[in-house]
Amino acid sequence: MIKNKLIKISEEYFLITHQDGTWEIIHEDRIKNINSPSC
């Protein structure tokens, strides 16, 4: 099972680290959009 790590780095931004060693910084609005039932 692959797990990504979500770390809050500021009031609005999160760092996501992936199992393959890559990472990305995303805005909280993107997380809300991903979790929204309309997607």
Image: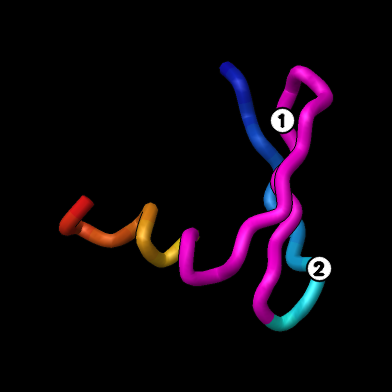
Q: Which mark is residue 18?
A: 1
| Amino acid, disc 1 | His
Give the quadrant of residue 15: bottom right
Which disc is residue 9 wearing?
2
The disc labelled 2 sits on which kind of residue? Answer: Ile
Please tell me which residue is depicted at 22% across the width and 50% down the height of the picture: 39
4 and 11: which is toward the camera = 11
Q: Residue at x 71, y 82 (%)?
A: 11
Dot placed on the residue nearer the N-terminal end, 1 or 2: 2
Q: Position of residue 9 (x, y in %)?
A: 81, 68
Q: Which residues are magenta?
A: 12-30
Q: Is residue 28 above or below residue 14?
A: below
Image quadrant where residue 24 sits: top right
Colour option used: rainbow
Residue 30 in the figure: left or right of residue 13? left
Please give left or right for residue 17 compared with residue 35 in the image.
right
Say if 39 sits above or below 31 in the image: above
Give the distance between the C-alpha atoms of the residues marked 1 and 2, in whole angstroms. Answer: 16 Å
**Which part of the image, by quadrant, shows the N terminus?**
top right
Residue 26: within the magenta? yes
Rendering coords of residue 10 (x, y %): 78, 76
